[in-house]
Structure formats: structure tokens, C-alpha cells
Image: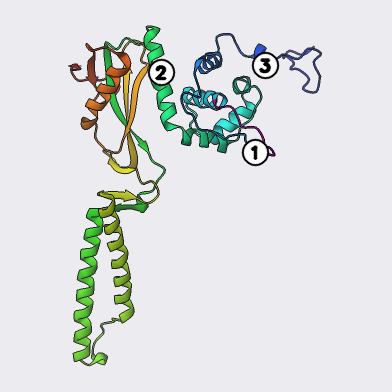
């Protein structure tokens, strides 16, 4: 007998193998997810998913199953649909939650993409449930914003100010080239070292047309900037650098730090979001005497409280 503990023989078959239910504790969060989702009227929420109407095709995954996966990922900070698929194949909690079913990452991603309104409604109803369970008081709510990096590059960004500057620069270059060409026509070409050609002017004219199209597009969209990769993302400034991002707004209840309201803004500052977040928080908590704290620096440092009218 050795001095170290010996593990099980991986190839030894068990006469009475444990069930998935035995491997998941009674107070595990997946049981709460299961219980909550099963109480929802999923069809009243108008969740869109693949219909199993084709006789030769496979049946669709139930919307409740996909919603359970989405909520599990939300609680465990797993945003990627590919990583959620990976967890389904290796995580005992996920195996219990999905009952052994294995939707692909594409199915999970499409569910999230096609149901933003339904997911927003579910979040609101869950906040109301927490309110009824006295886990949210609504007496004091803290509001703050955070930048979420967009899946877009600054290289695909079109800004009106930059485009106008580039157009002015090209007009100036074309004017200078034309002046030089006129000079070359009047003087002996062999007596000068200036190198100029019609091709260079044509390149500038082509570039000018491209910039003008970008400017026309901004006029049509009524925007000051537009990213070709992500049309809703905007440039936001941080002390050290600028980035393509969204401004996420979060309102948190003071008692147990539950989130009571969220929103996304394309503005890089929080001041014009205060009324919107205050209204959302008041609607969910149903508390006309709510006090609002505005976090300007960090989640632990607040300005003096403001009453919510």
C-alpha cells in the first residue's frame, strides 16, 4: 500500500453509475434557472426560434432550453456562443440543465441575436420578481456607465470632420499639380527636376470621389461618424486612448447589489442618460421616493444623492 491516495480505474465500469441529478447539488444555481424559466409563458414573450415544420428535418430546440443556456452564460460571464457550446459538452451543470441536448454555437448565437426584445422583457420581469421577494428595495439606486469595446476597427471608421479635411487636402494637391503642369508646358521639361504625371492627378481624383461618397453617405444617414463594420459603434474617449465602443448604463440597487435596469448608448458620456436610467429604475422598482446616486469615478465613490422625481 502506497503513501498516496489512488484514483479510480477509468476503464472500470460501475454497476450503479450516478445520475446527472446526483452530481448537481440541491442548492446549485442551475436548479434556480430551471425553476424560473419553467414559470415563464415562453410563447407570450414571442421568442423567435427555428420551427420544426419540415418533415425531413430535425425537431427544433425548445426556446426554454436556449433561454436556460443564455441565462447560465450570463450568470457565469460566458459571452461567447462557441464557449457556451464547449461548456455544454464538458460541464456537468450544463449537461444537467440541457438534459444532454447539445445545440451548436450557431443556434445559441441566433437565439440571442433574434430575440433582443424578449430577453429585455425577461430581464425586467426577473427584476420585478426580485422586488416581490424583497431582494430589491428601490430605496437607493446607483447609476454608472462603462464602455464596452465593439467588434469593429477604427480603420473602418468614417468621420465627417476627417473626410472634409481630407477633401480639402486633395483639392489643394490637385491645384498644386495643375499649376506645376502649366509651368512645365511653358518651360523646357529637360531643364527641370519636377516629376509630375497625369496618372498622379487621376489617383487624386479617384480618391476624391471616394471621400465624396463617404460624405454623401453621412449626409444620408444624418450622422457625424459611421463605422463600416459596426454601424452603431462610435468612437469613445478614455484618458489613455480612443476606442470603438458602446456606453453601457447600469442601475444597481443598494441592498444586495442586484442590477435593476440596463441600457446601451452610443454617446461617450453619461450625463444625458441619467433621466432615461432613472425612469427605467422607477418603473421596475415602483418606488416614487427612490434616491439616485450618480457614480462619476468608480463603483465605490458616489456624488451626493439626488431624489428621483
SS state under label 1: loop
Picture quadrant where residue 133 is located: top left
Residue at numbered disc 2: 125
Foreground mark, 1 or 3, reads: 1
Whether residue 241 can be seen here: no
SS state under label 2: helix
SS state under label 3: helix
Measured from the top left, where is residue 35 in percent x and y?
A: 53, 13
CB within 8 Å, label 2 to label 1: no
Seen from the viewer's position, the closer of residues 204 and 9 is 204
Q: Earlier in the sequence, mark 2 or mark 1?
A: 1
Q: In this picture, which residue range is highlighted in magenta?
A: 54-63
Q: Residue at x 60, y 35 (%)?
A: 104
Foreground mark, 2 or 3, reads: 2
Q: Residues within 10 Å of mark 2 (few under 14, many from 20)?
A: some
Q: Residue at x 19, y 20 (%)?
A: 303
Measured from the top left, where is residue 185 in percent x and y?
A: 22, 89
Residue 54 numbered mark, or none: 1
**Magenta stretch: dominant secondary structure:** loop
Query: What kind of colouring is applied to the model shown?
Result: rainbow
Residue 20 numbered mark, or none: 3
Separation of residues labelled 2 and 1 (CA atoms): 34 Å
Seen from the viewer's position, the closer of residues 49 and 97 is 49
**Left-right relation of 309 to 86:** left
Foreground mark, 2 or 1, reads: 1
Separation of residues labelled 2 and 3 (CA atoms): 30 Å
Measured from the top left, where is residue 264 in percent x and y?
A: 33, 33
Measured from the top left, where is residue 192 in percent x and y?
A: 24, 87
Amino acid at each position: 500500500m502506497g503513501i498516496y491516495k489512488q484514483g479510480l480505474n477509468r476503464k472500470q465500469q460501475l454497476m450503479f453509475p450516478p445520475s446527472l441529478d446526483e452530481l448537481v447539488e440541491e442548492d446549485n444555481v442551475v436548479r434556480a434557472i430551471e425553476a424560473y424559466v419553467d414559470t415563464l409563458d415562453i410563447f407570450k414573450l414571442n421568442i423567435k426560434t427555428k420551427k420544426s415544420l419540415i418533415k425531413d428535418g430535425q425537431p427544433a430546440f425548445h426556446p426554454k432550453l436556449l433561454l436556460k443556456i443564455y441565462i447560465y452564460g450570463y450568470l457565469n460571464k460566458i459571452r461567447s456562443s462557441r464557449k457556451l457550446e464547449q461548456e455544454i459538452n464538458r460541464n456537468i451543470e450544463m449537461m444537467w440543465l440541457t438534459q444532454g441536448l447539445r445545440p451548436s454555437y450557431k443556434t445559441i448565437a441566433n437565439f440571442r441575436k433574434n430575440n433582443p426584445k424578449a430577453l429585455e422583457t425577461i430581464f425586467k420581469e426577473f427584476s420585478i420578481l426580485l422586488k416581490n421577494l424583497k431582494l430589491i428595495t428601490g430605496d437607493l439606486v446607483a447609476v454608472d456607465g462603462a464602455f464596452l469595446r465593439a467588434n469593429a476597427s477604427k480603420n473602418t471608421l468614417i468621420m465627417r470632420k476627417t473626410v472634409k479635411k481630407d477633401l480639402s487636402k486633395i483639392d489643394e494637391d490637385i491645384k498644386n499639380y495643375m499649376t506645376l503642369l502649366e509651368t512645365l508646358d511653358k518651360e523646357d521639361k529637360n531643364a527641370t527636376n519636377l516629376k509630375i504625371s497625369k496618372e498622379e492627378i487621376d489617383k487624386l481624383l479617384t480618391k476624391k470621389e471616394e471621400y465624396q461618397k463617404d460624405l454623401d453617405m453621412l449626409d444620408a444617414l444624418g450622422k457625424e461618424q459611421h463605422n463600416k463594420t459596426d454601424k452603431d459603434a462610435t468612437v469613445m474617449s478614455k484618458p489613455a486612448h480612443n476606442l470603438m465602443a458602446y456606453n453601457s448604463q447600469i442601475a444597481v440597487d443598494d441592498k444586495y447589489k442586484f442590477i435593476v435596469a440596463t441600457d446601451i448608448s452610443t454617446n461617450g458620456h453619461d450625463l444625458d442618460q441619467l433621466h432615461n436610467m432613472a425612469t427605467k429604475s422607477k418603473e421596475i422598482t415602483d418606488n416614487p421616493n427612490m434616491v439616485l446616486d450618480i457614480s462619476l469615478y468608480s463603483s465605490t465613490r458616489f456624488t451626493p444623492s439626488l431624489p428621483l422625481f
